[in-house]
């Protein structure tokens, strides 16, 4: 149990539980003229009654069990740091990843070699001030709602700098692997929830019995029940990934007769395409459904079963002996964009990676920088699927029947970041407060403002 009952009538439904609809429209809005920030904040606040809460998603899901009703479009709203700081000057979220933004942090922290000025979304020319996620099971319904919101945002001085339709591809990502299997279970929300909600929401403890995690200056309670959202647009080169697996399987055939491209791909991910976790001695996908998530790596210290560099093991070492005590967890809500590779090989496709947490710096960024992109931690070997390196070859070890074999990915990555943003996802009541600017500056407020400015300068200078 958690110490504070979750406010499910206030928390956004995409944070806990997730929308998980067939269709999601992503709309990124940017304030065009500096004089319009206040208007934009008031517009965002006006969306508050339309934001879909956890309890509404639950109720609609229940109703859909007995009838094939269309999801009346659900809405999730994220606010960019620029809009927050320019309009709510009494509020500071102490997270220097969020405060500096993804475009600034991508090259230094995320190991991203792409130039943010050329990003499809969230680049230096078009920071994301508001991100809308409109969800439905009906494409026309989602598109029409997204269009209405886009048109209405124009009247508040914002322009839509990005819009994209995300489609759930039978719960697979574009390389063909089942995704969204392993999610942290949240105490007070999931039946067997163990992780305290403070790992994902402001105003709740991170550990049972501890003080609420709420790293903010916020006299008006605007951040209570809020969360931090990472959006990263990752283009996937399916042809390159498939070609690599096929060529490597052929190259390694003399050492490992019977090694297939499918098995190699599974070892890189740590799960077969069906989602079944890899295990020693398997030669083909066991096709388990639902795929198991009840396992750990305690009995597999050297990666004989699941390679130490496999994506799922790099990012969640599950009590492997080389494990660290604390594994940062994130609530993943990503959905693919673009058509299936076999239907249109030349088209743009990939994963709109979306994840909620209460600290971008110590969750998403930590996982990316210190584990996914590292050749040494938490277990030796690179994450060949998503990890990056500073130009050096990315290498992992797999265990063949004849002994260990090294495989290296080419320097050109098959996953290319093409934009994104760090956002604050307020609760419904928190969003409403964006419409009422902080009261006039009194003496104590001036003091507070000084504290915020000092904090922000300190964070940007010393805490990278
Ligand atoms: C296009 C890029 C990516 C692809 C294709 C991909 C694919 C996958 C697949 C197939 C799984 C296994 C299914 C599951 O457990 O749900 C998985 C798990 C996971 N991925 Fe990714 N992923 C991508 C990017 C990322 C990024 C950027 C992060 C975060 C930094 C991430 C974090 C995770 C986590 C936390 C898990 C669950 C691990 C576990 O608990 O077992 N992934 N991913």
Image: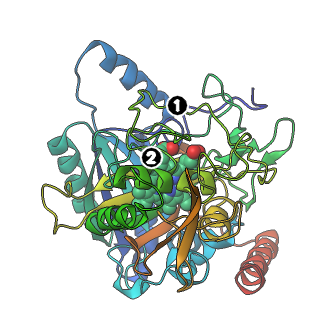
Which of the image's four quarters has the C terminus? Answer: bottom right
Q: Is residue 124 left or right of residue 143?
A: right
Residue 222's spot in the image, x, y percent?
63, 53
* SS of the residue under disc 1: loop
Q: Is residue 196 above or below residue 146?
A: above
Q: Of 419 and 234, which appears nearest the observer?
A: 234
Which residue does the numbered mark 2 point to in the structure image? Answer: 48
Which of the image's four quarters has the N terminus? Answer: top right
Q: Residues within 10 Å of mark 2 (few under 14, many from 20)?
A: many
Residue occupying the point 38% across, 24% down: 61
Q: Is residue 87 left or right of residue 275?
A: right
Distance Cα–Cα, label 2 vs label 1: 38 Å
Residue 309 disc label: none
Q: Of 399 and 358, which appears nearest the observer?
A: 399
Residue 264's spot in the image, x, y percent?
43, 55
> In which image quadrant can residue 380 be found?
bottom right
Which residue does the numbered mark 1 point to in the structure image? Answer: 292
């Amino acid at each position: 149990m958690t110490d504070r009952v979750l406010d499910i009538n206030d928390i956004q439904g995409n944070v806990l539980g997730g929308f998980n609809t067939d269709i999601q429209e992503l709309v990124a809005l940017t304030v065009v003229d500096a004089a319009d920030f206040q208007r934009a904040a008031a517009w965002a606040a006006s969306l508050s009654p339309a934001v879909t809460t956890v309890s509404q998603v639950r109720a609609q899901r229940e109703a859909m069990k007995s009838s094939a009703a269309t999801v009346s479009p659900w809405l999730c709203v994220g606010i960019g740091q620029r809009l927050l700081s320019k309009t709510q000057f009494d509020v500071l979220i102490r997270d220097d990843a969020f405060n500096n933004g993804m475009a600034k942090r991508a090259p230094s922290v995320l190991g991203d070699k792409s130039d943010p000025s050329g990003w499809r979304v969230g680049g230096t020319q078009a920071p994301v001030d508001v991100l809308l996620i409109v969800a439905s099971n009906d494409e026309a319904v989602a598109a029409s709602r997204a269009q209405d919101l886009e048109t209405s945002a124009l009247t508040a001085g914002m322009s839509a700098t990005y819009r994209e339709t995300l489609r759930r591809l039978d719960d697979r990502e574009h390389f063909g692997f089942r995704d969204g299997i392993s999610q942290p279970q949240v105490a007070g929300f999931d039946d067997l929830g163990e992780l305290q909600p403070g790992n994902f929401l402001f105003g709740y403890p991170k550990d049972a019995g501890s003080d609420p995690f709420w790293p903010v200056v916020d006299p008006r309670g605007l951040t209570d029940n809020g969360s931090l959202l990472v959006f990263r647009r990752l283009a996937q080169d399916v042809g390159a990934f498939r070609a690599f697996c096929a060529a490597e399987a052929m190259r390694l055939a003399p050492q490992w007769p019977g090694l297939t491209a499918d098995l190699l791909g599974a070892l890189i991910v740590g799960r077969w395409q069906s989602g079944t976790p890899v295990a020693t001695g398997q030669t083909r996908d066991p096709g388990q459904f639902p795929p198991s998530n009840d396992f750990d790596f305690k009995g597999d210290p050297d990666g004989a079963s699941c390679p130490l560099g496999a994506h799922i093991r790099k990012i969640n070492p599950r009590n492997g002996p080389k494990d660290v005590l604390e594994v940062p967890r994130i609530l993943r809500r990503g959905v693919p964009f673009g058509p299936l590779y076999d239907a249109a090989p030349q088209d743009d496709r990939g994963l709109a990676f979306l994840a909620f947490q209460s600290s971008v710096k110590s969750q998403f960024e930590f996982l990316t920088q210190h584990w996914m992109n590292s050749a040494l931690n938490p277990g030796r070997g690179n994450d060949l699927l998503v990890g990056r390196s500073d130009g050096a070859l990315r290498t992992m070890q797999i265990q063949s029947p004849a002994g260990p074999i090294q495989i290296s990915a080419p320097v050109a990555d098959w996953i290319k970041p093409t934009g994104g943003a760090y956002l604050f996802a307020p609760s419904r009541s928190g969003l409403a407060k964006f419409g009422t600017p902080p009261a006039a500056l009194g003496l104590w407020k001036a003091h507070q403002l000084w504290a915020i400015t000092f904090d922000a300068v300190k964070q940007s200078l010393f805490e990278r």
